[in-house]
Amino acid sequence: MQIQQLKDIGIVTEQLAASRDFYERLLGFEAVFVSEWYIHLKNGPVELGLMTPRETFAAVPAGGVWVSVEVASADAEYER
């Protein structure tokens, strides 16, 4: 698989506000989007999502992570 770009990485946490504070205060991130269940942070070109476990994401428990990658053809990678 040839990954073209790392698109999205995030952390699933019950401690949304505390996690935001940690990444802002200690690592220099800035919140660019904030909702009740999701915060998107940015530090230069690096972006990070923080999400609470929700009913629609029940398969990802607190303490889980997600990584999204971009490839030339998702269909070809699925077949492979």
Image (cartoon, rainbow, N blue to C red):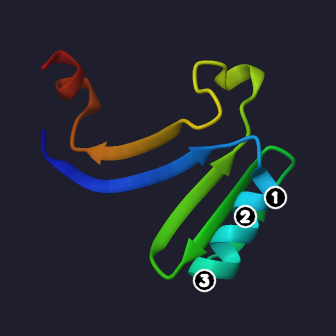
Report which residue position mark 2 lands on. Answer: 20
Q: CA distance from mark 3 to mark 2?
A: 11 Å
Residue at 34 percent of width and 46 percent of height = 69
Could you tell me residue 38's position as x and y percent? 74, 49
Residue type at mark 3? Gly
Query: Please, what secondary structure does the residue beneath circle 1 have?
Result: helix
In space, the residues marked 1 and 3 are separated at their CA atoms by 15 Å
**In the rendered structure, are the residues bearing label 1 and label 3 in contact, judged by CB atoms less than 8 Å apart?**
no
- CA gap between label 2 and label 1 equals 5 Å
Q: Element type at marker 2?
A: helix
Q: Is residue 33 above or below residue 6?
A: below
Badge 2 amino acid: Arg
Q: Position of residue 41 (x, y in %)?
A: 63, 67
- Crowding at mark 1 (Cα within 10 Å: few <14, some 14-19, many 20+): few
Image position, residue 58 (x, y; %) = 66, 19
Q: Position of residue 46 (x, y in %)?
A: 46, 71
Q: Going 68% across and 69% down the picture, which residue do you hit?
A: 22
Residue type at mark 1?
A: Ala
Q: For the residues labelled 2 and 1, say whether their Cβ atoms are less than 8 Å apart.
A: yes
Say above or below: 57 vs 19. above
Q: Provide the residue designation for mark 1.
A: 17
The answer to whether residue 8 is above or below residue 73 is below
